[in-house]
């Protein structure tokens, strides 16, 4: 079953700035992989997936107690650009 | 290089010290790294300091348990505070985590000595460790071949003795398949029993950390040191845990072992099928009842996996955006900067899986792909449950082939994905499974035997594995001669 892929749209959703050549290559590979993956559609039964956890755990909460946080300077040290304890980014909106 | 149990005995008898064990491991690493490339980072000072402390503690009568003083390697997707952790990706080059993963903290409490951080496929996505941004790991038995993956560095390090044991992570077979290809024991525990806190996430509903070791007993000892409830992991199990060691010397008489019909035939190398078949016959002679079982959903498990795992990966890897940590590209806006950082930082396989997962989750395709894959997952759990009404454990090859030539599958993603056809069902179901070596093919390459068990069935799994190990009498040393020559 051939699969329809708007690869530029998918790359935009995934926030990946790829060239046209790269997009074309990935589109072809995804087509082949998805043809194989489409075999999941051969399953007739439709059991409901309540919970994929093999031990049936869900909605686990820890006790609401205050614990020490990570050291702020140590965390900020990994950032490419910071100022006064903030992460620095270019404008969020396009234009002036 | 001795195993965990043996090294521990020598240490307590005063025949060796933690520093000497570490020096032995480092010496082997120095000798073999150029050909094998198992490690991304070795921090000698950190390791020597920990080993020195382990010796001082023992001298003071403080014994922290079976891993005390034992040199252990960690897959480089587990966070180590202040020590570079890259997940073999350019996007995390130079990253020094501000905290330790829970397994790292547990190893520390247990007195273990971390030798270094091992190579992997970028973000654990791959089956050959060729997707590492820092170059492949090669198989110690034949350095023109792959070590398997994604925990290829951990498997190779244990095989050559540059660590006595190692930790890996297994999302679709990433501990068991490289263990199989490198001739060591690799184990994936029941989902929820080893904390994922501080494991760089690939597919959260499938990822599980586990040990790679030289022996089955070492595997049980290492598992016991790392597992247990952790409030920092919301999927962590807080009930009663099995006792994996208790089965080791019990024998197998009276157990029922299922041979999976679907994990044989086309695509399986004859040497692999022969080695597995011979071991099944020997188990039968040892008093096991052999039952052929059919789990039809296994035929489409691989297809379901390559929708579910990429879908979860596309969400988990959204955090790599060039803002809080990692590689930053240029961009006039925040969005452009993120898209450029990601395109520059991720390698081709990771990019492919992010695109695949984004597609499978996108409007219009969600139910046909992701939704249907989740139904297949439920069908696999039901097939397993039905099989375990008849048998105690299931067995199969770990991988359809022995170690393949480096470069042979890099151009064909689907051919690479097929390496994991036997291991994926246990991840989709969340069940424990392990691989152990049972022999060599005619080229002298190891063949791995997989034992699968129901959730929290580690006790019976180790019981069968211990017998398989005894029957196989596998010798890990020929691999070393190959590298040395």
Image (cartoon, coloured by chain):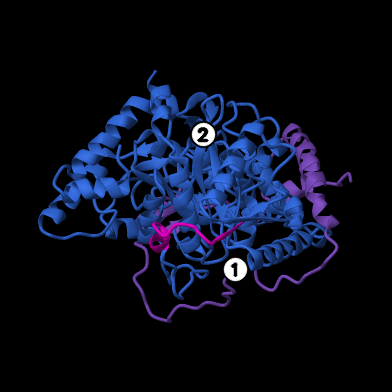
Chain colours: A purple, B blue
The answer to whether residue B142 is magenta is: no
Q: Residue at x 39, y 18 (%)?
A: B485
Q: Nearer the viewer, residue B150 or B156?
A: B156
Q: In the image, B14: left or right of B300?
A: left
Q: Residue at x 72, y 49 (%)?
A: B262
Quadrant of the drawing holding the N terminus of chain B: top left
Q: Position of residue B43 (x, y in %)?
A: 30, 40
Q: Residue at x 47, y 37 (%)?
A: B183
Question: Disc 2 is attached to a residue of which chain?
Answer: B
The answer to whether residue B253 is magenta is: yes
Q: Position of residue B287 (x, y in %)?
A: 53, 55
Label 2 crowd (10 A; few <14 / some 14-19 / many >=20): many
The answer to whether residue B177 shows anywhere in this view is: no
Q: Let me know if marks 2 and 1 both belong to one chain.
A: no
Q: In the image, B242: left or right of B451?
A: left
Mark 1 element type: loop
- Report the magenta residues as a range: B244-257
Label 1 crowd (10 A; few <14 / some 14-19 / many >=20): some
Question: Disc 1 is attached to a residue of which chain?
Answer: A
Residue position for label 1: A54
Q: Position of residue B295 (x, y in %)?
A: 72, 57
The answer to whether residue A26 shows anywhere in this view is: yes
Mark 2 element type: loop
């Amino acid at each position: 079953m051939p699969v329809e892929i708007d690869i530029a749209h998918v790359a935009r959703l995934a926030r990946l700035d790829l060239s046209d050549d790269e997009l074309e290559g990935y589109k072809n590979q995804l087509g082949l992989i998805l043809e194989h993956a489409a075999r999941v559609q051969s399953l007739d039964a439709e059991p409901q997936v309540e919970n994929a956890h093999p031990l049936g755990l869900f909605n686990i909460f820890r006790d609401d107690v205050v614990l020490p946080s990570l050291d702020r300077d140590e965390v900020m040290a990994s950032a490419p650009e910071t100022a006064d304890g903030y992460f620095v980014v270019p404008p969020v909106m396009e234009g002036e | 290089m001795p195993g965990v149990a043996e090294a521990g005995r020598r240490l307590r008898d005063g025949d060796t010290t933690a520093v000497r064990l570490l020096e032995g491991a480092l010496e082997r690493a120095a000798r073999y790294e150029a050909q094998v490339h198992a490690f991304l980072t070795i921090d000698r000072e950190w390791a020597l300091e920990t080993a020195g402390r382990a010796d001082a503690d023992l001298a003071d009568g403080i014994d922290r348990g079976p891993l005390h003083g034992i040199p252990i390697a960690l897959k480089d997707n587990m966070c180590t505070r202040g020590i570079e952790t890259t997940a073999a990706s350019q996007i995390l080059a130079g990253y020094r985590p501000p905290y330790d993963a829970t397994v790292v903290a547990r190893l520390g409490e247990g007195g273990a000595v971390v030798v270094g951080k091992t190579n992997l496929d970028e973000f654990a996505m791959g089956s050959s460790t060729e997707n590492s941004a820092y170059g492949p790991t090669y198989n110690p038995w034949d350095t023109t071949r792959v070590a398997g993956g994604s925990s290829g560095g951990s498997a190779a390090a244990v095989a050559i003795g540059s660590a006595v044991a190692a930790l890996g992570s297994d999302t679709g077979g990433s501990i068991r398949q490289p263990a199989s290809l490198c001739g060591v024991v690799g184990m994936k525990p029941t989902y929820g029993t080893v904390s994922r806190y501080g494991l760089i996430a690939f597919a959260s509903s499938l990822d599980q950390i586990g040990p790679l070791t030289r022996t089955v007993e070492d595997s049980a000892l290492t598992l016991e040191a790392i597992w247990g409830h952790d409030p920092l992991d919301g999927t962590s199990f807080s009930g009663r845990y099995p006792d994996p060691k208790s089965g080791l010397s019990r024998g197998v008489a009276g157990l029922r072992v299922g041979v999976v019909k679907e994990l044989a035939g086309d695509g399986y190398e004859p040497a692999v099928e022969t080695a597995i078949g011979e071991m099944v016959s020997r188990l039968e002679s040892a008093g096991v009842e052999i039952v052929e079982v059919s789990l039809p959903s296994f035929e489409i498990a691989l297809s379901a996996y390559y929708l579910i795992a990429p879908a979860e990966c596309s969400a988990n890897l959204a955090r790599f955006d060039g803002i809080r940590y990692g590689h930053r590209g240029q961009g006039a806006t925040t969005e452009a900067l993120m898209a450029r950082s990601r395109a520059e930082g991720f390698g081709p396989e990771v990019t492919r899986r992010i695109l695949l997962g984004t597609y499978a989750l996108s409007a219009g395709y969600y139910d046909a792909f992701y939704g249907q894959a989740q139904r297949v997952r439920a069908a696999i759990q039901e097939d397993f449950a039905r099989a375990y009404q008849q048998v105690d454990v299931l067995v199969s090859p770990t991988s359809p082939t022995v170690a393949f030539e480096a470069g042979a599958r890099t151009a064909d993603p689907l051919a690479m994905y097929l390496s994991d056809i036997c291991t994926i069902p246990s991840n989709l179901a969340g069940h424990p499974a392990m691989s152990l070596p049972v022999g060599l093919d005619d080229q002298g390459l190891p063949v791995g035997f997989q034992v699968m068990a129901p959730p929290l069935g580690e006790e019976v799994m180790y019981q069968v594995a211990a017998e398989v190990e005894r029957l196989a009498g596998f010798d890990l040393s020929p691999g070393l001669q190959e590298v040395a020559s």
